[in-house]
Amino acid sequence: MIRCRLYRDGTLEDERAFDPSVISAAKEAGERVWLDVTEPSEEELRQLQETFGLHPLSIEDSSRWGQRSKIEFYPDYIFLVVHGLKLDDADELIDSEVHLFAGQRFYVITVRREPLFDFVQAAQRLRSERDVPHEGVGFQLYLLLDEIVDGYLDTVERLEDLSDDIEDRVFAEEGGEDVQEEIFRLKRKIVKFRRLAQPMREVVDLIQESPGMVSAELVPYYRDVQDHLIRCVEFIDNIRDLLTSALESRLAQVSNRLNVVMKQLSGWAAIILIPTLIAGIYGMNFRNMPELDWRFGYPTALGTMAVMAFLLYRVFKKRDWL
C-alpha cells in the first residue's frame, strides 16, 4: 500500500492514495511529497521506479530485506537502509528495517515491512515545527532519522536496566540457576543491537557530506543525530563489558561453590578413611593376629575409630572445610 502526503512550506496540504499524475502536479507546483509504502508488491515498486526515475539497482535492493544500514548515492537521489530498534513487552529486540529514497529537492519515500516502524512523531513534528528550514527534503529526512535514533536511546536505557537487574542477581545470595542463561540471552541482544546500530554512524556522516541534501542550516541537526548515535554505541559497549564481567563473576562463583563441595567431600572422605582402615586391617582374618584374642580388642578398635573420626571432624570444622 502506498500513501501520498503533499507538503507546501512545511504544511501538510493533502493526503491521498498514490497517483503518478498527482506526483507530477505536485512537482510543478513546488510541493514536496512523502510516499509511505508498506508491504510493497513488485508492481508497486515498478510504479515508483517509473514515476521517480529510480535506478534498477536501488529498486532491487529495496526488494531484499535483512541488509545492514547503508547509504548509496545516485545522480538525483540517495538510497538508505536503516533499522528501527526497540524492545517489546517481553524484552525481545524488534528490528524494523526501513528503506528510504530521498530526492534532493522534491520527495522522500519510506518503504516498510513487518514489523513496521511507526513514523507518527516525525509526521507530527513536520507539521508543528516552523522555525526550521523547509526547503528541500533534508529536514524531513532528519526527522525520520532522529526518530529512529531516539528509539535507540530508549532501547539502550531499557537494556541498561536489564543489565543492572542481572548484575544484582549475580551478586545476590540466591541469584537463581538461570541467571547465566539470561546473561547469554541479553548479550545476544546487545551484539545484535550493536551490529545494526553501528553502521548508522557512517550513514549520518556521509549524509552530512552531501551538500545537495544537507544545507548549512541543517548541519547542527544532523550533528545532534550523530552525537546520539555515538552515545548509543558507547553505552551499548559499556553494557556489554558489564555483562562480560557479570558472566565472569558468575563462573567464578560456580567454581568457588564447586571447590567448597570438593573440600566437604574430601573432609568426609578423610573422616571415613580411618575407621575403614582399622576395620580393613582386622577384617583380613589372618591366624597370627594377637588382637583377635584380646578381650578388649573390639571396644578398643571401635573407640579408636570414634576418637580419630571426632578429631578429624574438629580439625576440618575449624578450618571451615565442613
Image: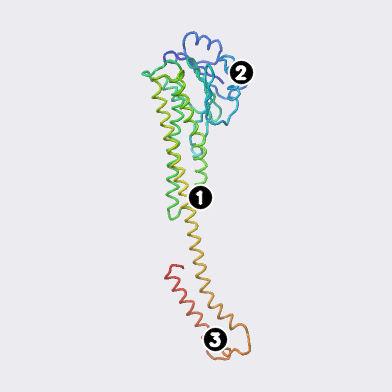
Disc 2, SS: helix
To which quarter of the image does residue 124 belong?
top left
The residue carrying pointer 2 sits among few (fewer than 14), some (14 to 19) or many (20 or more) residues within 10 Å by Cα, namely some
- Whole-percent x, y for residue 130 in the image: 37, 18
What is the C-alpha distance between the residues marked 2 and 1? Answer: 50 Å
Question: Which residue corresponds to mark 2?
Answer: 46
Work out whether residue 218 or residue 147 is closer to the camera in this orientation and state it: 218
Q: CA distance from mark 3 to mark 2?
A: 101 Å
Up-down relation of residue 243 to residue 266 (above or below): above
* Residue at image mark 1: 180
User: Does label 3 or label 2 sit earlier along the sequence?
Assistant: 2
Q: Is residue 286 left or right of residue 190?
A: right
Q: Considering only vertical position in the picture, is 182 above or below 313?
A: above
For the point 51% across and 64% down, the residue is 262
Compared with 237, 267 (above or below) is below
Label whose residue precedes the other's in the sequence (2 or 1)? 2
Q: Which mark is residue 96?
A: none
Q: The N terminus lies in which quarter of the figure?
A: top right
- Residue 80 point in image, percent of width and height: 52, 25
Decide: few, some or many residues near mark 1? Use Cα within 10 Å; few <14, some 14-19, many ≥20.
Answer: some
Q: State the image coordinates of residue 147 (x, y, percent, origin top left).
A: 44, 28
Q: Amino acid at mark 3?
A: Tyr
If you read the primary sequence from the N terminus, does the residue marked by circle 3 or circle 1 appear first?
A: 1
Query: In the image, residue 53 lies at what x, y percent?
Result: 57, 15
State if disc 1 and disc 2 touch (CB < 8 Å): no
Badge 3 marks a residue whose secondary structure is helix
Residue positioned 58% across, 19% down in the render: 55
- Under mark 2, the amino acid is Arg
On the image, numbered disc 3 is attached to which residue?
A: 298
- Colour scheme of the picture: rainbow
- Rendered image quadrant of residue 285: bottom right
Residue flagged by tag 1: what amino acid is it? Answer: Gln
